[in-house]
Image (tube, helix red, strand yellow):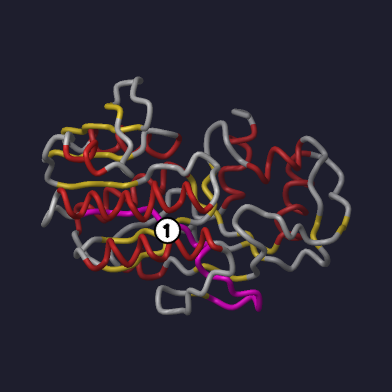
Amino acid sequence: MKLLLIGHGYLGRETARVFRAAGWDVVAVSLSGGDDSLACDVGDMNQVKSLPAADFIVHCAASGRGGAEAYQRVYVDGCRNLTEVFPGVPLVFTSSTSVYAQTDGSLVTEESPAIPGRETGRLLLEAERVTLAAGGIVARLSGIYGPGRSVILKKFLNGEAVIEEDGRRFLNQIHRDDAARAILHLATARDGGVFNVSDSTPLPQIECYRELARMFGKPLPPAGPRDPDRKRGWTHKRVSNQKLRASGWQPGHPSFLDAARAVASSL
């Protein structure tokens, strides 16, 4: 089986490793190429036409921290170009749980309303619609952390963390390695539709920081106002992974706290 992997960054490289370990032939693609990847701007139809044929496509490219224009090109145009150039080839598009804008602490499933408050979130939904219309699969990922990467841990260990208001806001996370395994699982199972890719333990911010303070012998962060400029938006929700687990996937790190010590040592 041959995988065309769009995006060769933090998640993409681990996804490539997981698929190769499972016996797949992987062709990786990135915007600039290099590091064993082909150069291609998926927002450019002519460049997409030059890509090799494959049995399966995974689109997990990042927007390069860009705004709406980058989201339109990388996600909406990218998914549209891929589905048009490779009709009938199954596609997994890695979206984000930020499309759920709930602020009431409710449990959100794939059936919950997805009405993002930001233009970037609306563009992710448009890319999802393109993918689903072509018979593809949408993986909505929570905040990714793992070796060498954790916004929560970095801020806590550097003394920059703030408990927003009363700390009730839920933190929904997914370990990079579990996300990559979930993508392989979805590619193997070939079940269409939308799947939340999140760990099994949404954590109230205050509970997370209390445990980190105990774990690392540091003081609890101070309280402060919520950050209205968070990249993923300010939400308060518990993301359910029940549908994905029912399909046969299980997270190797059910809680962010399970991996905190190992990740901290890699930062």
Tell me, yes or no, whether the highlighted magenta stretch contains residue 123: no
Residue shown at 58%/71% (left/top)? 101
Identify residue type, mark 1.
Val
In the displayed structure, 230 sits above or below 217; it is below
Q: How many marks?
A: 1
x, y (%) of residue 98?
A: 53, 62
Q: Of residues 254 and 92, which is closer to you in this image? A: 92
Residue shown at 27%/27% (left/top)? 38
Residue shown at 87%/58% (left/top)? 224
Quadrant for residue 177, please give it: top left
x, y (%) of residue 117?
A: 59, 69
x, y (%) of residue 51?
A: 18, 35
Quadrant in which the N terminus appears: top left
Q: Which residues are magenta?
A: 91-107
In the displayed structure, 202 sits above or below 91; it is below
Q: Which residue is mark 1?
A: 197
Local packing at callout 1 (Cα closer than 10 Å; few below 14, some 14-19, many 20+) is: many
Horizontal side of residue 238 vs 250, given as left or right: right
Q: Of residues 178 and 60, which is closer to you in this image? A: 60
Quadrant for residue 131, please give it: bottom left
Residue shown at 27%/39% (left/top)? 5
In the displayed structure, 258 sits above or below 16; it is below
Q: Secondary structure at mark 1?
A: strand
Tell me, yes or no, whether the highlighted magenta stretch contains residue 104: yes
Quadrant in which the C terminus appears: top right
x, y (%) of residue 125?
A: 41, 65
In the displayed structure, 81 sits above or below 121; it is above
